[in-house]
Image: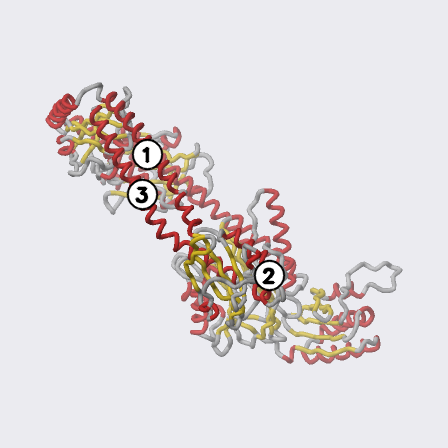
Amino acid sequence: MRSVAGQVFVLQVVIVLLLVVAAGVELVLQSRRDITREAANRSLAVAQAFANSPGIIEALSTPEPTVVLQPRAEAARVTSGVDFIVVMNTEGIRYTHPMPDRIGKKFVGTIAPALAGNTVIESVNGTIGPLVQATVPVKEADGSVVGIVSAGVRKAKIADTADQQLPLLLATAAGALALATAGTALVGRRLRRQTRGLGPAEMTRMYEHHDAVLHAVREGVLILDGSGTILLANDEARRLLPLPADTEGRKVAALGLDRPLTDLLISGETVTDRVVSAGERLLAVNVRATDIHGGPPGRVVTLRDSTELQALSGRAELAGRRLKLLYDASGRIGTSLDVARTAQELADSAVPVFADFVTVDLAEPVLRGDEPGGTPSVMFRAGHSGVRPDSPFIPVGEPVPLVPDTPRARAMASGDAVLEPDLTAAFAAWQQYHPDRATGVQEYGVHALLTVPLQARGVVLGMASFWRSDRPEPFDEDDRSVAEELVARAALCIDNARRYTREHAMAVTLQHSLLPGGLPDQSALDLAYRYLPAQSGVGGDWFDVIPLSGARVALVVGDVVGHGLHAAATMGRLRTAVHTFSALDLPPDELLGHLDDLVNRIDQDASLDGDAPITGATCLYAIYDPVALRCTMARAGHLLPAVAHPDGSVEFPELPAGAPLGLVGMPFEAVDIDLPEGSHLVLYTDGLVEDRHRDIDEGLELLRASLAARPGLTPEKTCDSVLEAMLPASPTDDIALLVARTRALPAENVDAWEVPADPSAVSGVRGEVSRRLEEWGLDDLAFTTELILSELVTNAIRYGGGPIRVRLLRDRTLICEVSDSSSTSPHLKYAASTDEGGRGLFLVAQFAERWGTRYTDTGKVIWAEQLLP
């Protein structure tokens, strides 16, 4: 072995020397080729960069170009590593040079191509030695040449870089030789230790003897390394498993063996005579580690065919089926977070491998997502499976009583599984409660029962019962262990599903309580809406319809990022805030500004408490006026609304996007849009137009097409038409859709006029009001209306400024409005007994159903509403 190590060392030295010589020759040849090319590239890059640098054209036009350009050229020369940068005029007179005494002299080189706008690269023998220089023009914006820049570098400077690589090459060669010497010494010493001093002849003879014995024995042998790769498999192992021809070198997991055997071989567990199925064979497997006495890491596996041992074979086969049952059940049970489905998966997983019929009963609170309290007297069937479809047992969904003095009752009382090989006594007890069912079960030949309570976290959720009819043998203790393991896994899955059901129900209840329960009464719009929660959970999409003063209506739609209770609660907070701000009659842009400030404050408080922020929520707020047929809108990062005109055209009006709420605190911008009567205003959230298979632009075009395809529909039918065309098969996000068809308040229901700023004009207002109310048939409201308007007009004359206008609107209520140019708002107060005034607004508040103030661009409007008789 020592001679082999020496030969390996000599071979390594020769290879290293050859590589060093070849690398040296190649380095010299390559450096000669690359010197000129590298010098040309560097000179050209520097010359072009300096010729195109800012300010060079202006410097050339100054009386003293050298004063400006010489420092810049020298700084660029030092930085770039070239030997010179020369700037000259079109006659070749130098303005810059590393040697100042050469400034003002004529440039040595070819400049004619540069004067023509071209680049010149040439090799010359200068005073500093062989060099490569590049000459480029300096051009005006119109392309005219106003100067020339030349940069050059010596070839020797480039060659110095290549020469610096030679010591590195020699050092690398020396290091390689040192490593080869050390490696050879280590290999030789390791070989001597592993072979225990045996020579090549002795090693060959020992290997031949071991190989003959290994392939002659009638016992399979596998040798695996520490990573599970097969190093050796003898002939018997190939016959028993069977193994492919290229077994050596492959991972155990890649051989396609049965799962129990694969798991055993990969586990590294030391076993003795463990029976494992491999196809149709039963193998007694022994596994031992190879590194017990300091050997290499790995395992030796021996395999014996024990199929002829019938008793052992039967027990091993049964154990294999049970293990396979548990393994398969772990993948089949708990595939969803639905309680009833999980119960049915438990029943399906045990038939027909373990039982002929399986019933799963759950306490009623568990089906609702609640935690059961105490022992239930009645449960509901949640899962059932059998070998025959015409089962005699109580069907799914029906109540199942817990009959006293039966195996199920004893299992529920003790909390442990109960084996019942003879059901004669149990049938007698069941006859008192369900005689037809009990008789049917007996006639089906059901003779054995194994019932196990479903328990999770110390709470009994229900009962799983395993029945046998076709199989003659009853359940045994091993079956009890398998059933308990199976039911324990299923109980945990059912409890997880129960908890999810409870939380989901809570989130849905919270969300439904926070969304509008219905649409408010108003005359400005025909409305319809749809809200579809995502299948993955409750989200934060929301909408609202808010009646405002002056027969106007506010439409709101918004989207909160995320799903679950937090998103639903956040949605409720934003909706409440919008209602509060709407009560102040704020314009859309100001309302969104206040909402943005609120979100910022909420997020600041949430960051202190460690709660999730709500930054990024979007909102669109629109106010429709049925008198002016105008809609004022503003949005905070929300999608554009769609407007379907009566002629069938559809547009997405240009509306400044604004940032989502809580992001930057920038002001929002409102836009006025004229909407003819009969127009459809469509507000929606992104779940309608965007999903994982459709981008937002495609969704918007699809929405446009669906609205244009069927114009003139009612809002309800428009909602159905849009959802039919756009609803994804499995929505991943909430969808909120609000469709509003505009109405106009008839002109005969509106009366408005200006009032002079004179107290004597109040009597004229009362007369005009009396006349108008008589025309509308509202004589019963004449007295209160005259009183209200007298007080409001008097306040406007006394405290406000002109022009003063009065407007009467007959809608669902009688609306009185008085506007002036003042921005001060009156406040309701209780006047003292000695005060001469201060009772006017108090009287207005007493006679009016609602009253308030809204601000406009020109002042304010004080309004009051009265119910129609």
> Toward which corner of the image does residue 186 lie, by quadrant?
top left
For the N terminus, the quadrant is top left
Kindly report the distance in space between the C-alpha atoms of the residues bearing marks 1 and 2. Answer: 56 Å
Q: Disc 3 marks which residue?
A: 23
Residue 156, above or below 846: above
Sequence-wise, the earlier of marks 2 and 3 is: 3
Residue 406, above or below 148: above
Rendering coords of residue 215 (x, y %): 12, 28
Q: Disc 1 marks which residue?
A: 176
Rendering coords of residue 193 (x, y %): 25, 20
Q: Is residue 273 left or right of residue 410?
A: left
Residues 793 and 193: in front is 193
**Crowd tier of the residue under label 1, counting other residues whose Cα lies within 10 Å: few below 14, some 14–19, many 20 or above:** some
Rendering coords of residue 387 (x, y %): 23, 43
Mark 2: which secondary structure?
A: helix
The three-letter amino acid code for the residue at tag 3 is: Ala
Residues 839 and 700: in front is 700
Residue 527, above or below 613: below
Q: Is residue 530 left or right of residue 184?
A: right
The three-letter amino acid code for the residue at tag 2 is: Thr
Rendering coords of residue 619 (x, y %): 56, 60
Kindly report the distance in space between the C-alpha atoms of the residues bearing marks 2 and 3. Answer: 48 Å
Q: Nearer the viewer, mark 2 or mark 3?
A: 2
Q: Nearer the viewer, mark 1 or mark 3?
A: 3
Q: Disc 2 marks which residue?
A: 66
Sequence-wise, the earlier of marks 1 and 3 is: 3
Mark 1: which secondary structure?
A: helix
State the scheme by which the image is colored: secondary structure
Kindly report the distance in space between the C-alpha atoms of the residues bearing marks 1 and 3. Answer: 14 Å
**Crowd tier of the residue under label 2, counting other residues whose Cα lies within 10 Å: few below 14, some 14–19, many 20 or above:** many
Mark 3: which secondary structure?
A: helix
Residue 402 visible in the current orientation: yes
